Image: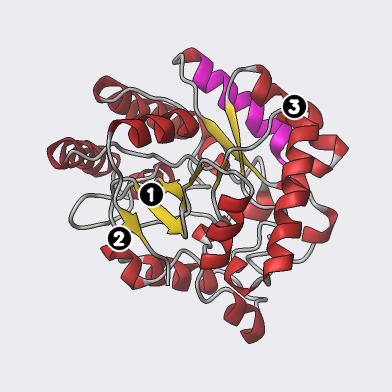
Amino acid sequence: MKTHGDAGWETFPSYLDVVVPRALKFLEERDLNITFFIVGQDAALRKNHDALALISAAGHEVGNHSFNHEPWLHLYTRDELVQEFERSESAIEAATGEKTKGFRGPGFSLSPDVIEVLIERGYIYDCSTFPTFIAPLARAYYFLKSDTMTEDEKEKRKKLFGSFSDGFRSLSPYQWSVGESSIVEIPVTTFPLVKTPIHASYIIYLATFSKIAAIAYWKAALQACKFSNVQPSILLHPLDFMTGADVPELKFFPGMSMPLAKKLDLLGRIIGFFTDQFEVEPMVEHSRRVNSLVTLPASSLC
């Protein structure tokens, strides 16, 4: 809501008590263990502790999704970044009992200072890159759906979802290097070569036009990943398990008008196709495995 420029975010409304049990039930039914990236401000609120504790109790990894969930970390000073990480790590550990080993930037926000702070704080991996050419279109759609966002607020968000040039980034894991130290980068997978999104929210959005076409697109993406030797890192969003009836404040997101039963059935089908072809594991296990099996190429973030 804050990113979208909506009023009322200051009260920190939460849907975690709805979405966490729903997502955990979905995963348990399929015997899947994944990574949940948690916002520190959510974890800092006592009202969310019971829901967040369920995640680690069910054996899932918890990762850091920043404290304030502001997708302009590139504007933070180094001291502000250190404080952001200290607060989020402390709050998440207090709520879940687990220390975070991985980070995903809100809105895929990343900078050289973020990488340096992650390395200094002992993180094993980052997964904040989104190699797609359509980021400017996604950002324009987001701005279009907000009637209250000022020009100053849009300026802060001008790197939301990344830039066109991010589409040239690798889909395979690599390392960010700072001096003698490094950290594994696990990109969010997009359709090989064409670099269009394939995360669940995008498939759900396509299904609002044609379910048959959306599933065909998903199957083609998985086949392209296998052909290109890309091990997919698939992003799920809480709203993939929810509708506008659950959280009216966020009904502007694509796919929120789809009935819940229909949405969960579609999500179950696409995840089923995925697990038929790939083994699912939490991000920390995946990053350790790829780092031990191959010498990852290094990259620099300008």
User: On the rendered structure, is 226 left or right of 187?
Assistant: left
Q: Main secondary structure of the magenta part?
A: helix
Disc 2 to disc 3, C-alpha distance: 35 Å
User: On the rendered structure, is 157 left or right of 168?
Assistant: right
| Badge 1 vs badge 3, beta-carbon distance below 8 Å | no
Disc 1 to disc 3, C-alpha distance: 27 Å
Please tell me whether residue 254 belongs to the stretch shown in magenta.
Answer: no
| Badge 1 vs badge 2, beta-carbon distance below 8 Å | yes
Taking the spot 48% from the left edge, 54% from the top edge, the residue there is 128
Q: Please rate how many residues cluster around mark 1, counting C-alpha atoms within 10 Å: few if below 14, some from 14 to 19, many from 20.
A: many
**Which residue occupies the extreme front position in the image?**
180
Residue 221's image quarter? top left
The residue under label 2 is 169
Q: Earlier in the sequence, mark 1 or mark 2?
A: 2
- Amino acid bearing label 3: Gly
Give the magenta part as a residue range.
Answer: 14-28
Name the one closer to the observer, 71 or 92. Answer: 92
Identify the element where label 1 is drawn: loop
Q: At which x and y percent is residue 102? A: 55, 41
